[in-house]
Image (cartoon, helix red, strand yellow):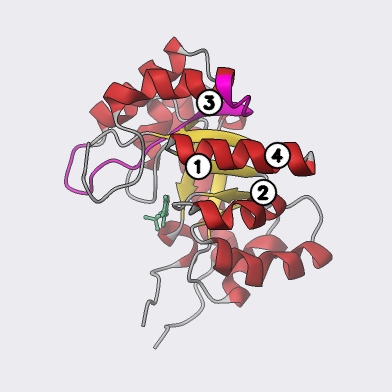
Amino acid sequence: MSDQMPDIARNLADVKARIAAAAERVGRHAREVELIAVGKVQPDERVEAALLAGQRVFGENRVQEAKGKWPGFRETFDGIELHLIGPLQTNKVAEAVALFDIIQTVDRPKLAQALAKEMEKTGRRPGCLIQVNTGEEDQKAGILPADADAFIQECRAEFNLPIRGLMCIPPVDDEPSPHFALLREMARRHDLPVLSMGMSGDYELAVELGATHVRVGTAIFGARDYG
Ligand SMILES: *Cc1c(COP(=O)(O)O)cnc(C)c1O
């Protein structure tokens, strides 16, 4: 059973204070870092509590779950910005383009092509990030680092996608710093401004290493109940 409702306003304030402190440690400013609240699998009332506390930028892993949740919230709350942070199947591209403001998980030519086609058709162009599988894990989505340079160029030149930056999810058992550093260097090489990296366990480190977007779930909403 899910436990008591956490104090979400307080958790949000705490995470933001930690982001600001981390930014300050490396001479950055808190406003250079966007906090994406990851509400996947969380009860609607927790997401609503975040909205009531003023949070407007959210991440979802699954198109289906987001479809059930966000059109309703958008009727009540202005200024919501929704990021897709989970793998995207090509048969869900139309729904994703309609629903999300940013798609963080572009990771293969077939998907890039499907996105380009849908954007052409609808005129709607959500910003895109390329997910890099920095740990080269078999089970993980993302383009391999060795293929990333060519893929980034292909997405821009051939598919004309609005590529804004890069995203990664380091392997759970690895020290995340080298992964964050690799992503940052890759973004620098391609003159890409957005770096989406860092989750509940390592977002402060990610901010110190240049993250412009951190994706935080548990630290805001409490543990996810998959039961
Ligand atoms: C679930 C998820 C997060 C948030 O994870 P927490 O550890 O709960 O902060 C961040 N990014 C992605 C891609 C996720 O799937």
The residue range painted magenta reads: 158-175
Nearer to me, 187 or 43: 187
Residue type (three-letter) at the residue carrying disc 3? Cys
Q: Quadrant of the N terminus?
A: bottom left
Q: Position of residue 114 (x, y in %)?
A: 57, 42
Q: Between tags 2 and 1, which lies in front?
A: 1
Q: Decide which of tag 1 and tag 3 comes sooner along the chain.
A: 1
Residue 169 placement, left or right of 123:
left
Measuring 57% from the left and 67% from the top, which residue is drawn there? Answer: 64
Question: What is the CA distance from the residue labelled 1 to the residue labelled 3?
Answer: 10 Å
Query: Dot 2: few (<14), some (14–19), or many (≥20) neighbours within 10 Å?
Result: many
Location of the C terminus (image quadrant)? bottom left
Residue 147: percent from left, percent from top = 32, 24
Which residue is identified by label 2?
Answer: 97
**Residue 26 seen:** no
Q: Which residue is mark 4?
A: 119
